[in-house]
Image (cartoon, rainbow, N blue to C red):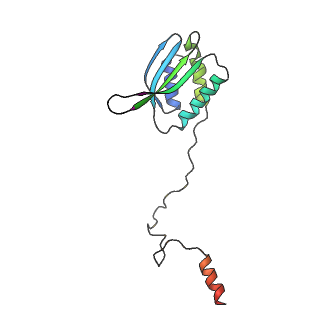
Amino acid sequence: MNAQELLKVLQQRTSFQAVDHSSTPKQLRIMGRVLPPTDGWWIVVDRILDAEKAGAIWGVDISKLYYKPGSELRYTWRIILQAPDDVSQYFQTIADLITSAPRAQAAPVDEMPLVGADPNRHESRRGRGAQGVLRPVLAVTTRR
């Protein structure tokens, strides 16, 4: 597997879009941006960092690089993969980590508008919002 194929796997599985990359025999440096939704990106980052922490031969640095092209402050994501020998021999291992990461789940819907509902549906005859059931119950019990 080469660097282009690894970048393709990363882009297909996450919202990461590579802008530039360069490599030496011991290092691959990738610069890019993460487009929303970012859930899949964070899952893959977590998986890669866990593998490195577990004692992988290769190392990774995932960070933001800040720059100022004019008056605005911007950032780009930087991924640096390093190995003591040829880093490209670990591309398949890293691609397998990326593809084996669980997919991000859609967030549950807490609220959504009712189709065809009147915008004033919560107003009562007196112009107030929804009323509790306690007031009519108290009125009935006090009449007895």
Q: How many marks?
A: 0
Residue 50 location in percent, x, y? 64, 27
| Residue at image point 65% right, 24% down | 53
In what quadrant of the picture does the N terminus appear?
top right
Q: Quadrant of residue 47?
A: top right
Above or below residue 127? Residue 63 is above
Name above or below for residue 35 compared with residue 81: below
Q: Is residue 13 left or right of residue 76?
A: right
Q: Residue 72: within the magenta?
A: yes
Q: Which of 74 and 40 lies nearest the eye of the viewer?
A: 74
Q: Is residue 36 magenta?
A: no
Question: Residue shown at 62%/76% (left/top)?
Answer: 134
Q: Residue at coordinates 57% horizontally, 39% vertically from top-left?
A: 104
> Residue 143 location, x and y as percent?
64, 89
12 or 18, nearer to the observer: 18
Q: Give the range drawn in magenta.
A: 66-73
Report the residue that reaches farthest toward the front: 71
Find residue 81 and report its horizontal and vertical position in percent: 54, 19
Main SS of the magenta part reads loop
